[in-house]
Each structure stands twice: as C-alpha cells, then as structure tokens.
Image (tube, rainbow, N blue to C red):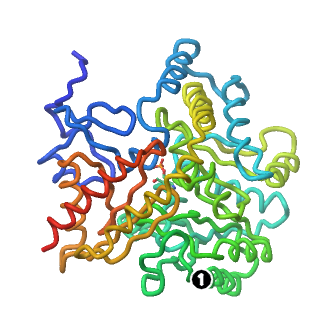
C-alpha cells in the first residue's frame, strides 16, 4: 500500500517549494537515485550534478561513510531531547564543527536548516546586545540581494524582493546595505572583483541615521542565491572595521560558503575576515539529514550565558536541535571532508573551473561570468519582456542533455560537488555552451 513508486500518479498533494507548480506538474522531471557526481532520473538517465543538489552535497552523493553512520545511529537511538538532557553525539558534532570555525567561534547552536540558522543568529545577536547593557540595539541590517532563508527574520534582512512582497508583514527595525554588483566596472572578473570596497561605507550612513540602535549586520561572504556576487576586494575588511568601530556584531551567513565551497573549510578563511557569528547548514551533513548550526564567538556565549540569572540562559531552541541522526551524519561528513581534504581539492580545481566558466564569454547573450572557489555565475541577457524565459529554457535543455544546473532570474549558478573531476567540468560547461547557443534567438 505504501510502496514507493518512481512514478507517482498524484502530483497534486505535494505543494512544491519555490517552484512553478503548474508548469512543473505539466512536464514533471523526477530524480530517482544519486551516486557520486550524478543523479539518475526515473528513466535511468544520468544527470551530472552541477549544483551539488542545492549547494549542499559537497562530498558528492551516496557517500557510504555518512549513510552507515546514519543507519547505525537510527538503530541505537532514534531521538533524544536536548532540552535539559543530552546525548553524546550532539556534543561531539558541535566540537567537530568548532574545530574548523574561525578562532573564538567555539560555541555551536544546532538548528535544522539555513533559515532557522539565520533567525537563530539574529536572535542571539539581539540577546547579546541586551546582555551587555545595549538593549537599545534592536536594529538588524542586511544587504540588498541577500538571501537568508524564508523565516520572518531571514526575509526581513534578506534583499530579494519577490521573497518579501507576497507577504507584506516583516520584522520592524531592519535596514539594508547596497548590494555589491557593479557590472560596469567588474564584469567578467576572475575571482574577487577589484571595485566595490567603498560600498561597505554605507554602514556609516546607516549609523548616522540610526545612531547606536544597530545590533548586527548580516551578509553572505559570497552571495549565492541571488546569482553569485563575489565580495569585492577589501569590502569585507571594511565592513569588519566599521562594525568594530560602532559596536555592531558581524554575522556571516555561511550556509553555502561553508564546508569547502570556497576552497577553505569556511568562507571566512578564504576572504581573510572573521565574523562574530556564523550560520551554516547544507554541507554540514552533506544534506543527508537536515541540520543547520550557528557558531558563536566566546565573548557572545559568555555574555549571554554567564550574565544570566540561574536557569535557562537563552529562550530558544528546536525539538530537533542536535538530533541524533543529524549529529551522526555531521560527524561522519566532517570526517570525510577532512580525510579527503575536500576544501583543498576545491581550491586545486578552481583554476580549471574558472577557465571553463570564462570560456563562455563571447557567446550570444552572455553579459557576465563571475567565479570564486567552486562557484560560478553566468549572467545572460534576458529576452525582451520575458524575464527568466531564456534561463529556464537553458535549464531544461541542459537537464535533458544530462547536466543539472541552477538558474535564478537570468543567471546560471553552478556549484558542483567538491569531488568534481576535469571531465565533469568539461561536460558541464560544454552542455551549457550548447544550450546557450540553441537559445540564442
Ligand atoms: C545563504 C543562505 N542562507 C540561508 C539559506 C536557507 O537555507 P534553508 O533552505 O536550509 O532554510 C540558504 C539556502 O539556499 C542560503 O543560501
């Protein structure tokens, strides 16, 4: 009765997230299994994964070490509460994460997703400012084109219009920095673009406007979901200096830049600037079990915990914070990243990947190519009066030719698993080139 069919005959019940439900359900494309660098459709067609699922399967698919750790834990203990109780794997997983976070970010709060991590980070920032006697600091600053998931905190500090305007209500006391996309100066940059550090100075304008009421600034070190915006040289350094100068916490959303994506364990290391609080999810468990986390600087943890009266210090948490299966998956995943040195592998592959991405320059309608680590963005000229149409058609052409890409607006975003080989890179960009040519009109 409950058999899993590779061909469901009722597509109506599942309201698909961030999906054109009507269009999808008229021509559904189903993934049935995954292994290494590939998905396989329910017709057993191989599809090379150019996006690590959704920026999350950094070690590739079906990794035995992770699967076995989850299976083993499921048989030992399915669930244990972490409210006023504990189980060893949650503590071990937190310690393992903290081995790789920037110096001082030694305390780890578990969530179940990137969205929950963003909201958790914002709440911790507010709680810390109160704990240190700065209760007037209630304002949160995000950035235009930022993506911090879909909770109310995340969409409020986020800067992607459609994710907000359908809902009306947002958090109050939120402001935004300008985005860092400067195509006139930076188009076709390889790695970090030269222009745009000055855009961080807008924080001075917000301080002039809001005084000492800003609690935290949250940014993605590399903005992914909006279509790959690489931080301009010097930008994050400047932002860090201004946050320090004005008593504002700096939060990095490392949900996609964590776990090797930029060629280092966390993006903070690659960009050379550490935050006070860092969110993560996705690659934390190689996406095998949902899990997110927030790593917090010792001064913040001490400020909230040591400063509180006896009893619960932070009135926040999820039933599944530190879930045993997720904890087991996180431990096995991090061990795998270390054993195979996947961040270094990503770094070693970056040059080849970069050349392949920039080989698309000159094709019809390619107006920018940008890249950093194992991330690339290819911006296309949209069709007049039909935004996204060209990119959606290219997505379908690539999929049908056996390559999974991701598109957002008229931008193609690529983020393959870090185990990607040169022949996969050739195949991914060759297929994209063919699709771009086929959609030239
Ligand atoms: C930077 C960033 N933050 C938060 C999220 C939200 O994560 P989730 O979909 O797991 O809630 C994402 C997802 O893509 C992300 O890229």
- Return the x and y of residue 146 as percentages of the image width and height: 50, 67
Look at the image and tell me whether residue 154 can be seen: yes
Residue 350 in percent (x, y) is at: 50, 57
Q: Is residue 223 above or below residue 311?
A: below
| Quadrant including the N terminus | top left
Circle 1 Cα neighbour tier, 10 Å, few/some/many (<14 / 14–19 / ≥20): some
Considering every residue shown, the one lying at the far top of the view is 75
Can you give x and y, in whole percent of width and height, for residue 267 in the image? 61, 57
Give the quadrant of residue 141: bottom right
The quarter of the picture where residue 86 lies is top right
Left or right: where 423 falls relative to 89 = left
Task: Tell me residue 321's x, y (percent).
Answer: 61, 35
- The kind of secondary structure element at disc 1 is helix
- Above or below for 122 versus 385: above
| Relative depth, front residue between 84 and 26 | 26
Name which residue lies at 31% across and 58% down.
429
Q: Could you tell me which residue is drawn at 52 percent across and 22 percent down? A: 70
At x 72%, y 42%, the residue is: 98
The front one of 380 and 143 is 380
- Location of mark 1 (residue): 199
| 301 left or right of 220 in image | right
Q: Residue at x 73, y 45 (%)?
A: 314
**Residue 389 seen in the figure:** no
16 or 270: nearer the viewer: 270
């Amino acid at each position: 009765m409950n058999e899993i069919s590779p061909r469901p005959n009722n597509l109506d019940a599942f309201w698909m997230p961030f999906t054109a439900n009507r269009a999808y359900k008229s021509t559904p494309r189903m993934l049935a299994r995954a292994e290494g660098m590939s998905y396989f459709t329910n017709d057993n067609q191989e599809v090379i994964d150019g996006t690590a699922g959704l920026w999350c399967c950094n070690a590739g698919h079906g990794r035995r070490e992770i699967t076995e750790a989850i299976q083993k834990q499921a048989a030992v203990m399915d669930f244990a509460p972490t409210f006023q109780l504990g189980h060893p794997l949650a503590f071990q997983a937190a310690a393992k994460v903290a081995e790789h976070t920037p110096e001082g970010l030694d305390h780890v709060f578990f969530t179940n997703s990137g969205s929950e991590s963003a909201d958790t980070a914002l709440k911790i920032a507010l709680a810390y400012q109160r704990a240190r006697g700065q209760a007037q600091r209630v304002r949160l600053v995000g950035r235009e084109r930022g993506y911090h998931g879909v909770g109310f905190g995340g969409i409020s500090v986020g800067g992607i219009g459609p994710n907000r305007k359908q809902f009306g209500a947002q958090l109050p006391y939120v402001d935004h920095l300008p985005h860092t996309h400067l195509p006139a100066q930076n188009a076709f940059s390889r790695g970090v673009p030269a222009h745009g550090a000055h855009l961080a100075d807008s924080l001075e304008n917000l301080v002039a406007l809001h005084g000492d009421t800003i609690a935290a600034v949250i940014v993605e070190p590399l903005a992914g979901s909006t279509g790959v915006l690489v931080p301009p040289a010097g930008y994050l350094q400047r932002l860090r200096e201004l946050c320090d100068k004005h008593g504002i916490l700096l939060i990095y959303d490392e949900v996609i830049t964590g776990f090797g994506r930029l060629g280092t364990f966390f993006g903070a290391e690659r960009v050379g600037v550490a935050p006070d609080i860092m969110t993560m999810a996705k690659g934390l468990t190689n996406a095998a079990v949902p899990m997110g986390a927030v790593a917090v600087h010792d001064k913040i943890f001490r400020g909230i915990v040591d400063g509180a009266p006896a009893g619960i210090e932070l009135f926040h948490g999820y039933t599944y914070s530190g879930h045993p299966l997720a904890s087991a998956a996180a431990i096995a995943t991090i061990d795998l990243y270390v054993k195979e040195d996947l961040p270094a592998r990503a770094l070693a592959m970056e040059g080849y990947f970069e050349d392949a991405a920039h080989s698309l320059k000159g094709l019809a309608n390619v107006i920018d190519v940008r890249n950093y680590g194992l991330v690339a963005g290819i911006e296309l000229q949209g069709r007049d009066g039909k935004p996204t149409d060209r990119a959606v058609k290219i997505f379908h052409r690539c999929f049908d030719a056996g390559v999974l890409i991701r598109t957002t607006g008229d931008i193609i975003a690529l983020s393959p698993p870090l185990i990607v080989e040169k022949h996969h890179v050739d195949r991914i960009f060759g297929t994209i080139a063919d699709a771009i040519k086929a959609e030239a009109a």
